[in-house]
Structures are given as C-alpha cells and as structure tokens.
Amino acid sequence: MTREQLLALRWPARFAAWALGSGTFGRALGAVALAMVFSILGAYRLGSTVSVEDFAFGPSRNVTIDALINAGAALVVASALTPIFFWLLGSSAMHAAARIRGLRGRAYLPMLVLFAYAALVYQAPTSVAALAFGPLGKGAGSQLANAVSLAMLAWFAFVVYRGIEQHYGVSGERAMSIFVIGGLVFYLLPLVLIIGTLVALVITAAVLQYF
C-alpha cells in the first residue's frame, strides 16, 4: 500500500471500503490483539493515576460505599477490554439491527473484520494520548487526551455508518435506523449503567457525609 493510499484511509468511507473488501479474519484477530495492548496500557495509566477510594475519605467507609467502590474499580478493568466491546458487541449489534430492519442474507464476517480494524485505529491514538498527557484531570494535557478520544470516537462512528451503507446496501433513513438501533441497544445501555454506578457512588458518599 502506497503512502497516498494509506493517507486516504483517514476518510471513513475509504476505510470502510478497504476493510470490508480486503480484510481477513486472521488480520482482524491481530488488530484486536494489538488494540488490547494499547487499551491495557491506557487502563494501567488510569488505575495508577486515579484511586477510586478517594471518593470516600478514611478507613471507616460504609458497606454501601465499599460495594460501590468495588464496582468503580471494575470500570478500570472494563476500560482495558474496550477493544473487545467495540469489536464483538459493536459488530453483532449492527448486524442484529440490520436483521431487525429486514436485511437478511448478508454475511456477518465482514462487519466483524471492519470493527476489528476500526477498533485498533480508535484505540491506538486514544491510549497513546492518555499515556502521554494523562487520562483525567483539569490540565491542558488531560483535556487534549480527551479531545483525541472524542475525535477518534467520532471517526469510529462514521466508519461504522459508512460500513453499514456499503455492506448492507442501504442509505439515508434505513442506514441511520440500523446505526441508531445498534447503538442504543448495545452501547447506550451499558454506558448508562456505568455512569449510574459512578453517580450512585458520589451521591451515597455525600448522603453519608464523606464529603
């Protein structure tokens, strides 16, 4: 692949066409494995930077606080598994959504490959930025890392949308409905649960006067 061809892959439509047309399952596994390396390094950086116990001051924590802290600590582990979530949950979500919209007879494997490749491209710069500038905080470095993460997430979303158009042969409202259904069922609900856990931790700590 030439330099010009490689640079062209920054466009979601080009990337989706390349992954769907030339990707293989073996390379997809390699992409996910490499993405896991980046995500584990990023999760280690997060775990070493932020202590969940800081939400509840002192050793005399309430049992409820302890349980919520354990749930919060699990989020650090979950962040290391982000490529797996993106790969398996994402591809199966969109394929299931396509079937819900009446599109049958399309192979699942191409979407599996697309999500694997896209997960690596998302995870690599996101984790590198977190390692270089810090995953959390109010400083300029952390804000830059967050900006990189949001930009790559937007790119990932556009790749998925273009992949839906190309693989399932749909466009407009039908393509968007597949994207929205898949996103709501397999991404939004877990996100709500994660955010709910963190909110419950803070509220419980405040009610028990740990702040």
Image (cartoon, helix red, strand yellow):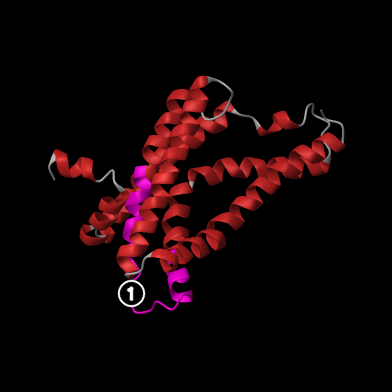
Taking 75 as reference, is 43 left or right?
Answer: left
> Does the magenta portion include 118?
yes
Magenta run includes residue 132: no
Q: Residue at x 34, y 60 (%)?
A: 163
Question: Is 63 situated above or below 148?
Answer: below
Q: Is residue 93 visible?
A: no
What secondary structure predominates along the stretch shown in magenta? helix
Residue for badge 1: 106
- Category of crowding for the residue at label 1, using alpha-carbon neighbours closer than 10 angstroms: few (below 14), some (14–19), many (at least 20): some
- Could you say which quadrant of the image residue 52 lies in? top right
Residue 20 vertical placement versus 51 (above, below) = below
Q: Nearer the viewer, residue 48 or 186?
A: 186
- Residue 96, image x and y in percent? 46, 70
Residue at position x 40%, y 76% in the image: 103
Query: Would you say residue 7 is visible in this rendering?
Result: yes
Residue 185 pos. (x, y %): 56, 63
In the rendered image, the quadrant that contains the N terminus is top left
Find the magenta span and give its range. Answer: 93-121
**Outermost residue to the left:** 2
Q: Quadrant of the C terminus?
A: top right
In the displayed orientation, state which residue is furthest to the front. Answer: 172
Asked if residue 171 lies left or right of residue 71, the reply is: left
Q: How many marks?
A: 1
Q: Amino acid at mark 1?
A: Arg
- Tell me the SS state at disc 1: loop
Check the image and name the residue furthest to the right: 208
Return the x and y of residue 119 as percentages of the image width and height: 38, 49
Residue depicted at 61% across the width and 57% down the height: 189
Relative to 45, 70 lies left or right: right
Residue in the foreground of this view, choosing between 59 and 53: 53
Q: Residue furthest top?
A: 139
